[in-house]
Amino acid sequence: MSFPRSIKTHDDYKLFLKLDLAAHGLDRWRAYYRLTRPELLFQRTLRAAEYYQTKKGLGQIVYYWNRLLLKRRSVQTGITISPGVCGPGLSIPHYGSVIMHSEVRVGAFCRIHSATNLGRYGGGAPKLGDFVYIGPGAVIYGDVAVGSHVVIGANAVVGRAVPDNSTAVGIPAKVLPDRPSAEVMPPWIRAYMPDSY
């Protein structure tokens, strides 16, 4: 199953919103989530900014409005992610400090816990594949490639490449091969994984 990497059309926008909800185990948006799910409200504002940044005229005004809302919701939740960084199916299970540099690129259906930092260092920023699970307190820095179906363990510090289907743990992180993220992902995300996992 392949997913679009960015929002270019209205159909892409609707798909990103749908897959983000699915990554949280939800089937549709409900108005009361604005009060009970601040991390999901942040994500929806992020997606609106991504969609409207491609528009002209009135769309640009809507884009700047959503950027202002995004900054406000960033302060409220502690989540700092720029438009265009994360693929569809983003799952931030609870609010708290999640910081990503604007040059970071994250694939589809990644689950990112609180107190994590994905940062630029030495001239580059991390690039993550699909179905990556990032545990609480993890740090990923520099121009490193993190493959698909990877687990970054709690409090791990990753400054080098991590191959597909493995787990990185410790400070500095050591790679444990043949430990894919399917083992730790919730069932509603596993439902989107290829059959081989």
Image (tube, rainbow, N blue to C red):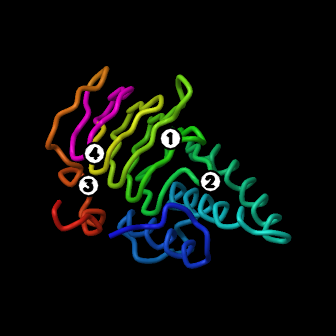
Cα–Cα gap, marks 3 and 2: 25 Å
> At label 3, which amino acid type do we have?
Met
Residue 182 percent location from the top left of the image: 21, 54
The mark that comes first in sequence, 4 or 3, is 4
Name the residue tied to disc 2.
83
> At label 2, which amino acid type do we have?
Pro
Q: What element carries label 1?
A: strand
Q: In this rendering, which labeled residue sits more in front, label 3 or label 2?
A: 2
Asked if the residue under mark 3 is in contact with the one under mark 4, i.e. CB atoms within 8 Å, the reply is no
Is residue 107 found left or right of 58 in the rendered image?
Answer: left
The mark that comes first in sequence, 1 or 3, is 1
Q: What element carries label 4?
A: loop
Asked if the residue under mark 2 is in contact with the one under mark 4, i.e. CB atoms within 8 Å, the reply is no
Q: What element carries label 3?
A: loop
Q: In this rendering, which labeled residue sits more in front, label 4 or label 3?
A: 4
Cα–Cα gap, marks 4 and 3: 10 Å
User: What residue is at 53 percent from the left and 25 percent from the top?
Assistant: 121
Secondary structure of the magenta portion, mostly?
loop
Cα–Cα gap, marks 4 and 2: 23 Å
Name the residue tied to disc 3.
185
Residue 189 or residue 147, whichever sits in front: 147
User: What residue is at 35 percent from the left and 54 percent from the top?
Assistant: 130
49 is higher (above) or lower (below) than 134: below
Is residue 183 found left or right of 64 in the rendered image?
Answer: left
Name the residue tied to disc 1.
98
141 is higher (above) or lower (below) than 91: above
Q: In this rendering, which labeled residue sits more in front, label 1 or label 2?
A: 2
The mark that comes first in sequence, 4 or 1, is 1
Q: How crowded is mark 2: few (under 14 residues within 10 Å), some or many (20 or more)?
A: some
Name the residue tied to disc 4.
150
> At label 4, which amino acid type do we have?
Val
